């Protein structure tokens, strides 16, 4: 097997990349690790700095005795988080890396050995619902999902969950946290049928992201529509009350899903970004730089600003390489789709009720830059409810003080008040409105 200059086979997966990096650290090959740094990481971390941090950990825990199996999880912006357990003579640690599709490192840190995993939130009552595996879509791009059906008789509302940007699994897994599973179990415990599924970029990543003219619409809409129709076909679900819930980019694209399938009863938008994404990338970069220059440097901010300007440029085309665009992961076709899409104006013309929720401490999607657009664009709609949860961050985890990336690391659950408000809106508040709107549509036809 041919090996590249870093001693690893070209085209290997993120997990194998992570193990290779751990082996290099064990063997003292820190310059070779530095060769794998993407530009943002290279700007803040050197081989010498990594070697010093590694030496401190080995001095504390003893020499390395084993390197364990990697765990890979999708993250925002197309990166994959890889966690590699490293066992030492007197303890252990975790090497945590953010890896892109080319095997380059965008993040690298040494963390304490993992001691937690996902556990059901207190508001989930598993005896109240059952789950089964389903297939969403057909053909080579079909994906797997989980259907959560409340027990008991009667027709009930249903909801399809859409995760944020990146190749997420059905639970939106991130470390020990699974926010979409929290939502599914919480809502199913309250009488709502829920369908969640692995994104096509999770199951068929290389096949779709290497396809010409791949767009945000391609990533979300076909499978979301198939999921809506599968949920409508369940005998215990009222087909006129199947909603779509989207988080982050899933919230941005939710109005497009409802446009594609008129049978969608309404939308629940959680931290849906309305500010153009290339502009928000610059804003977030400035925010992180103001918190800690080790998170992102001034040079990184300048680079992101230049890439964002390319999105607004008349020279942007489907052929524009991902490396010249924000985040360095999506081709020009994806950004052209984003540039031409306004989620608020798309939502404003839908004759469907909407619930828009926002975390007050969210720095990725904010009250000032994003929710303000939803409020202004939907102000004329009496069937739109908007709520802000002052203590919640982007994942609707409650906390205090300025939100940071490190806040997402500990095991935690979606705010129970958010779960209760969504369930109440679906089962009580919107039942009458949805049935009334359905009657009107039937009369028009």
Image: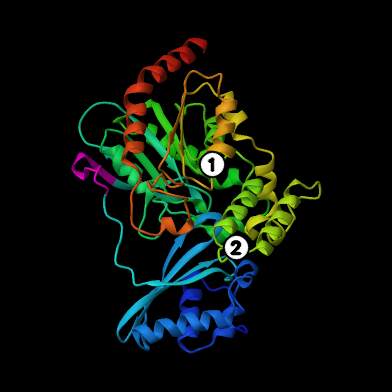
Query: Residue 235: where, in percent of width, then height?
Result: 30, 31
Image point 40% across, 30% down: which residue?
242
Query: Does residue 10 appear in this view?
Result: yes
Image point 52% across, 79% down: which residue?
50
Q: Label 2 belongs to which residue?
A: 296
Query: Does residue 211 appear in this view?
Result: no
Above or below residue 327? Residue 5 is below
Query: Residue 69: where, in percent of width, then height?
Result: 38, 75
Q: Quadrant of residue 424?
A: top left
Query: Residue 127: where, in percent of width, then height?
Result: 18, 43
Residue 20: mark: none
Q: Which residues are magenta?
A: 121-131
Badge 2: residue crowd in 10 Å (few <14, some 14–19, many ≥20) = many
Residue 366: mark: 1
Q: Which label's residue is closer to the chain start, 2 or 1? A: 2
In the picture, the quarter occupied by the N terminus is bottom right
Image point 26% across, 34% down: which residue?
190
Image point 57% across, 73% down: which residue?
11
């Amino acid at each position: 097997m041919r090996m590249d200059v870093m001693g690893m086979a070209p085209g290997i997966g993120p997990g194998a990349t992570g193990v290779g990096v751990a082996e290099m650290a064990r063997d003292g090959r820190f310059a070779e690790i530095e060769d794998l740094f993407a530009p943002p990481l290279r700007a803040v971390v050197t081989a010498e700095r990594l070697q010093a941090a590694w030496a401190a950990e080995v001095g504390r825990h003893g020499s390395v005795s084993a390197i364990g199996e990697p765990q890979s999880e999708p993250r925002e912006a197309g990166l994959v988080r890889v966690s590699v357990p490293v066992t030492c003579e007197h303890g252990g640690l975790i090497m945590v890396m953010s890896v892109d599709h080319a095997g380059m490192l965008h993040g690298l840190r040494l963390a304490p050995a993992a001691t937690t995993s996902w556990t059901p939130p207190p508001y989930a009552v598993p005896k109240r619902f059952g789950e089964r595996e389903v297939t969403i879509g057909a053909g080579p791009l079909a994906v797997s999902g989980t259907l959560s059906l409340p027990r008991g008789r009667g027709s009930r509302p249903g909801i399809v969950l859409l995760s944020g940007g990146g190749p997420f699994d059905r639970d939106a897994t991130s470390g020990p946290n699974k926010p979409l599973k929290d939502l599914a179990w919480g809502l199913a415990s309250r009488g709502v049928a829920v369908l969640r599924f692995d994104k096509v970029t999770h199951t068929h990543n290389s096949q779709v992201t290497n396809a010409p003219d791949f767009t945000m619409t391609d990533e979300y809409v076909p499978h979301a529509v198939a999921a809506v129709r599968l949920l409508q076909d369940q005998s215990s679900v009222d087909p006129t009350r199947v909603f779509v819930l989207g988080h982050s980019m899933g919230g941005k694209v939710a109005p497009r899903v409802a446009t594609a399938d008129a049978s969608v009863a309404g939308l629940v938008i959680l931290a849906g970004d309305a500010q153009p994404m290339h502009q928000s990338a610059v804003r977030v970069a400035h925010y992180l730089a103001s918190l800690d220059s080790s998170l992102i440097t001034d040079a990184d901010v300048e680079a992101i600003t230049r890439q964002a300007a390319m999105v607004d440029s008349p020279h942007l085309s489907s052929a524009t390489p991902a490396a010249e665009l924000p985040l360095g992961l999506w081709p020009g076709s994806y950004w052209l789709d984003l540039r031409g899409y306004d989620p608020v104006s798309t939502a404003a013309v839908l004759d469907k009720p909407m619930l828009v929720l926002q975390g007050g401490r969210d720095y990725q999607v904010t009250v000032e830059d994003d929710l303000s657009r939803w409020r202004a664009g939907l102000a004329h709609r009496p069937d739109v409810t908007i709520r802000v949860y002052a203590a919640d961050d982007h994942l609707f985890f409650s906390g205090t003080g300025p939100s940071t990336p490190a806040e997402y690391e500990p095991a935690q659950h979606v705010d129970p008040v958010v779960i209760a408000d969504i369930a109440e809106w679906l089962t009580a508040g919107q039942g009458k409105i949805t049935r009334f709107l359905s009657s009107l549509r039937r009369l028009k036809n």
